[in-house]
Image: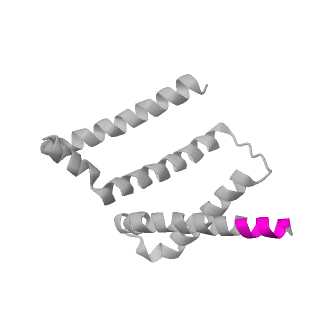
């Protein structure tokens, strides 16, 4: 009986988290914006399948009992894809909230928005490289 209760709780929690994730992606509009920028709205089913398969694969790799080893070149691409996803998520969040235009107006840097964005990007890149090359050898 306790197994049934655990299964129901786990399923309910998974549905809640999955629904929150999909709502988060929907509110941010990452996929529609990506389709708009790449002019690939006709491939909407491929986008949907990629999100679903990526989520299922991520869940399986996170909670499964398997250990996967890849060559370093493949790991570099894996990390690149993760970085692109996190970058798009962060960019979509800031675009929705209009954070950077508000910051530049408040501190009187209306003309230097591109400089601010490049400073943030280069700081993030250099900080990540420093972390991975120095601390995670």
Question: Where does the image place residue 125, in percent across and percent down from the top left?
Answer: 42, 35
Question: Where does the image place residue 37, in percent across and percent down from the top left?
Answer: 35, 64
User: Is residue 35 left or right of 133 when viewed as pictured?
Assistant: left
Q: In this rendered view, identify the residue nearer to me: 110 or 68.
A: 110
Task: Determine the image quadrant of residue 30.
Answer: bottom left
Q: Please say whether residue 65 is one of the residues in the magenta stretch.
A: no
**Which image quarter is the C terminus in?**
top right
Q: Residue at image x 48%, y 26%? A: 130
User: Is residue 28 left or right of 20 when viewed as pictured?
Assistant: left
Magenta residues?
Answer: 2-9
Q: Residue at image x 32%, y 60%? A: 96
Task: Determine the image quadrant of residue 7.
Answer: bottom right
Q: Is residue 64 visible?
A: yes
> Image height check: is 48 above or below 101?
below
Q: Residue at image x 23%, y 39%? A: 115
Q: Residue furthest top?
A: 134
Question: Where does the image place residue 70, in percent across and percent down from the top left?
Answer: 70, 43
Q: Please say whether residue 4 is one of the residues in the magenta stretch.
A: yes
> Image height check: is 70 above or below 55?
above
Q: In this rendered view, identify the residue nearer to me: 98 or 44.
A: 98
User: Is residue 28 left or right of 70 when viewed as pictured?
Assistant: left
Task: Please name the predominant secondary structure of the magenta segment in the image.
Answer: helix
Q: In this rendered view, identify the residue nearer to me: 47 or 18.
A: 18
**Which image quarter is the N terminus in?**
bottom right
The tally of labels here is 0
Q: Is residue 29 visible?
A: no
Q: Residue at image x 66%, y 63%? A: 56
Task: Determine the image quadrant of residue 76.
Answer: top right
Q: Residue furthest right?
A: 1
Question: Where does the image place residue 47, in percent across and percent down from the top left?
Answer: 51, 69
């Amino acid at each position: 009986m306790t197994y049934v209760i655990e299964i129901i709780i786990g399923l309910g929690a998974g549905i809640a988290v999955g629904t929150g994730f999909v709502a988060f992606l929907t509110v941010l509009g990452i996929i529609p914006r990506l389709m708009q920028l790449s002019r690939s709205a006709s491939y909407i089913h491929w986008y949907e399948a990629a999100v679903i398969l990526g989520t299922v694969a991520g869940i399986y790799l996170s909670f499964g009992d398997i250990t996967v080893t890849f060559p370093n070149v493949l790991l570099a691409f894996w990390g690149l894809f993760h970085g692109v996803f996190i970058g798009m998520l962060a960019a979509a969040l800031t675009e929705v909230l209009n954070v950077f235009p508000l910051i530049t107006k408040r501190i009187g840097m209306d003309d230097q928005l591109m400089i601010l964005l490049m400073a943030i990007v280069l700081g993030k890149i250099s900080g990540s490289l420093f972390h991975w090359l120095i601390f995670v050898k």
